[in-house]
Amino acid sequence: MKTIIEPFRIKMVEPIKLTTRDEREQLIENAHFNPFLLAAEDVIIDLLTDSGTSAMSAEAWAAMMRGDESYAGARSWYRFRDTVKDIFGFEQVIPTHQGRAAEHILFGVMVQPGFIVPNNTHFDTTRANVEYKGGVALDLPCAEAGDIDSDYPFKGNMDIAALEKVVAEHGPEKIPLIMVTITNNSGGGQPVSMANIREICRVAKAAGIPFYIDACRFAENSQFIKRREPGFENTATIDIAREIFSYADGCTMSAKKDAFANIGGFLCTNDAELAHRERNILILTEGFPTYGGLAGRDLDAIAVGLCEILDENYLNYRLDSTRYVVDRLLKAGIPVVAPAGGHAVYLDAARFLPHIDPLQYPGQALAVELYIEGGIRGVEIGTVMFGLDPHTGEEKPARLELLRLAIPRRVYTQSHMDYVLEAIGQVWERRNDVRGMRIVEAPKFLRHFTAKFERI
Ligand SMILES: *Cc1c(COP(=O)(O)O)cnc(C)c1O
C-alpha cells in the first residue's frame, strides 16, 4: 500500500474553533504581529512547535494514574531512570522540568566567560544559556546545510574540519564541551549521520574534551540513519539510538519532543563528580534529584513515551507524513528546505519573499500572512530569532530566513496537512504584495518570544 496512514486511531478529540479571515486580520494586529502573542484558541492549525504538544497514548495516560507522588525515591522515579538508562546508557540521570533547565545546569557548571561551545547549530535556548554564562555559542554546520537545494542526506552534520581547527586553536582550556544537536532543529530539522557522530567523538576524545548530545529528537534522527546511512538498513532503531549515545559523555533532553510528554527533560552524564555538582544546582532550582521539577506522573508518562517513540511503524509514519508536505510544496515550486526533516517543514522565506530585506524579517512577514490566510501558526527562524548579538547589541542578517511549521506528534491528520498546503499556496499566489516588518519593542535575550512588530 502506498497511502500513508496514521498508525493510531482517535479516541478523544479537541474541537478547533474556526475563525474568518477578517477576524484573523484583527487578531494578529492585536497580537502585535507576533504569533507567540495570539491566544491558542484563535489558531486553527497550530504548528508553532512540536514541543509538549504531542498526543499521549492510552498507555501513557494509564501510566499517569500509576504516578507515585512521594517526594523522594518514588516508584515513578525508578521507572523513569531505568528507561532512560536502558536507551541512553549513561550512568547519571538528572530529571529536569524541561530541556532548557538541563542546559542551564550543564552550562552553569561547565561554561565560564570567554569559553567556546561548538555545536552543529545551537537551538535558541541552548545558545541563550551559553551566552548567559558569557560563553560563545559557535555554530559549525556542514557546508551542505547552507544549500537549501542540496539533497545531501545528512545536512545536520557538523563541519569536522572546522571543528578540528577550533579545537586546535583553543583546546580544552577554552572549550568545556562539544555538542551536537540531533536532529539539527534550527538547521532545518536535518539529521546527523552516525559517521559524523563518530568523527566528533574522535576529535573530542583526542583533545580530552567532553562530548554532549542535545538529544531532543534522537528517535527521528535514529530512523533517518536507518533509512539513509548504508549499513544500518537492518539495525533496530533502538540499537542505532544506543550506538549514538555510546559515543557521548552525556546528553541534554527535552521530553517534550521525542518522549511524547507535555513537560519534562533530563540531563545525563557518566561523570559522577560532575553529576554531584549538577544535583546541587538541581536542588536549588528544580527539586530533589528523584523528581527534578516534575510530578511523579510526568516521570511515568516520559518512561512510556520514550519506549513508544522508538516504534518503527510510528517513526516511518512520522518521517513519511512530513515528507508528504514537503514533496507537495516542491511540486508546486514553493521554496522549502529539502530533503524533508523529521519534525517540521521549513519554508524558505528568503526565496518566498525575495523583495523583503532580511532586516525587515521576511520569515516574520510570512508567519503573519499564513496566519491571516488559514489561521495557521508557525515560527520565524531567522533574523528575528538569531540576528541580534545580545552582548554588542548589533543586528545582522541570520544565515537562513525560515518559517518553521512544526508538526505536533500524532495530533493532525493528512486532511489537516492538505488544508495547510492550500493556505501556503494561496499566500504564494499573492506573495508580491506582502510587506516587511519592523520591531517596535523587544528584549535582548530570546526576543522572538515577546517582540512587538508593525508592518512597514
Ligand atoms: C526544544 C529544544 C530544546 C529546549 O527544550 P525545552 O524543553 O523547550 O526547554 C533544546 N534543544 C533543542 C534542539 C530543542 O528542540
Image (cartoon, rainbow, N blue to C red):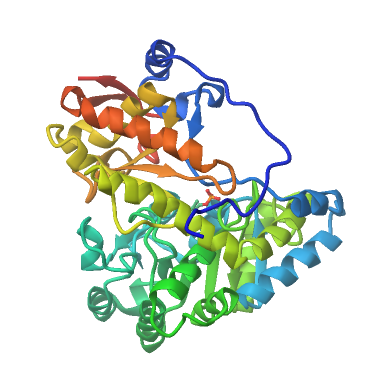
The percent position of residue 85, horizontal first and vertical second, equals 68, 74
Lateral position of residue 269 relative to residue 231, left or right:
right
The picture quadrant where one finds residue 291 is bottom right
Tell me the residue at 50%/27% (across/down). 44
**Is residue 128 shown to the viewer in this render?**
no
Tell me the residue at 32%/33% (across/down). 424
Lateral position of residue 136 relative to residue 418, left or right:
left
Lateral position of residue 429 relative to residue 208, left or right:
left
Residue, far front: 1
**Quarter of the image where the C terminus is located:** top left
Q: On screen, 329 above or below 241?
A: above
* 339 vs 134, nearest the viewer: 339
Residue, far bottom: 206
The percent position of residue 292, horizontal first and vertical second, equals 70, 55
**Is residue 286 shown to the viewer in this render?**
yes
The percent position of residue 99, horizontal first and vertical second, equals 55, 54
Tell me the residue at 59%/75% (across/down). 238
Q: On screen, 132 above or below 170?
A: above
* 169 vs 213, nearest the viewer: 213
* 133 vs 407, nearest the viewer: 407
Q: On screen, 259 above or below 228?
A: above
Picture mark count: 0
The percent position of residue 440, horizontal first and vertical second, equals 29, 22
Residue, far left: 355
The picture quadrant where one finds residue 179 is bottom left
